[in-house]
Amino acid sequence: MSEITPQQFMQRILGLVDRLEASVNDVHQSVDWDTVTAARWVSQGDAGWLRPLAVSQDMRLDDLLGVERQKALLEANTRQFVRGVPANNALLWGARGTGKSSLIRALLAEYADKGLRLIEIDKTDLLHLPALVREIEGRPWRFLLFCDDLAFEADDSAYKSLKTVLDGTVEAAPDNLLLYATSNRRHLLPEQRSDNLGASMVDGELHPGEAIEEKIALSDRFGLWVSFYPFTQEHYLLVVQHWLDQLAKEHHLEWEWSESLQKQALRWALSRGNRNGRCAYQFARSWVGSQLLEQQL
């Protein structure tokens, strides 16, 4: 076999690079927002690309029970945004499994036909917002930038960068972009008892210490705070009955609420150490599934 010259070698390398670039361009085609309602930002170096998501739109606002105040607040803000009038970035914080992410999905289902679209993004990728903005700038749709489970540890310096992003990039972004984030922490950072040691009295007024001010400063960048709280037993059982009814209708299963079924639902929650909407839905799926399986035997 004859040896190749350096020039031939370079030509082969350049040809390989051209083929790789072509294949990347084929994979990372622009999202067709006419047919796609949600996408995820995938980071790539200092930029990234949008990957379409197949999102189920079966979650409705009526499926979220016991959170009427939260629904009203966020729906009003979203309605303002969709109609092109001023609206706020929103932070949904509180107990896990209480419907924070579900509410955002339900709003997407409610307003998708009015031009609302959703882009999921990791907290570590928020610094890529300028690149993301270029992807959606000038488009006619209204984009919710959704960051789920946003939280930082005490030694995580990334939260300082996020403050800059919220103050600069998002507020300066086109008016068709809004940030919705969920978190289990009100101020997105762990709060320690020692933080209060820096508090002081000035002219009879209590002034928080620098540690507290630093933590409040981040969540304060969100114009709308929506708080979620743990379910009471009554609230939990109400949600259990709702999902049992929904799933039973879907599978044409006859059922009725009983004391025995209530005890099963409570034991299910006790075994998980939590009463919330996610737990209620999981119990309903388990119970309906077991009933359908019995019918097949």
Image (spheres, rainbow, N blue to C red):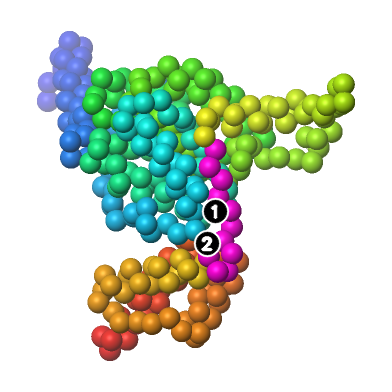
Residue 124 percent coordinates (x, y): 48, 32
Which of the 4 quarters of the picture holds residue 84?
top left
Q: Quadrant of the C terminus?
A: bottom left
User: Is residue 92 among the parts visible in the rendering?
Assistant: yes
Is residue 118 shown above or below 60? above
In the image, which residues are magenta?
225-235
Is residue 231 shown above or below 162? below
User: Viewer-proximal residue, 186 or 131?
Assistant: 186
Q: Mark 2 near mark 1, Cβ–Cβ under 8 Å? A: yes
| Extreme-bottom residue of the structure | 297
Q: Residue at x 29, y 56 (%)?
A: 58
Q: Quadrant of the N terminus?
A: top left
Rate crowding at label 2 as few (under 14), some (14 to 19) or many (20 or more) other CA atoms within 10 Å.
many
Amino acid at dot 2: Asn
Amino acid at dot 1: Arg
- Which residue does the numbered mark 1 point to in the structure image? 96
Circle number at residue 276: 2
Residue 214 percent coordinates (x, y): 68, 27
Mark 2 or mark 1: whose residue is earlier in sequence: 1
Q: Is residue 87 left or right of residue 229?
A: left
Looking at the rendered structure, the secondary structure element under dot 1 is loop
Residue 41 percent coordinates (x, y): 35, 33
Looking at the rendered structure, the secondary structure element under dot 2 is loop
Q: Is residue 189 left or right of residue 107?
A: right
User: Viewer-proximal residue, 58 or 129?
Assistant: 58
Residue 234 magenta: yes
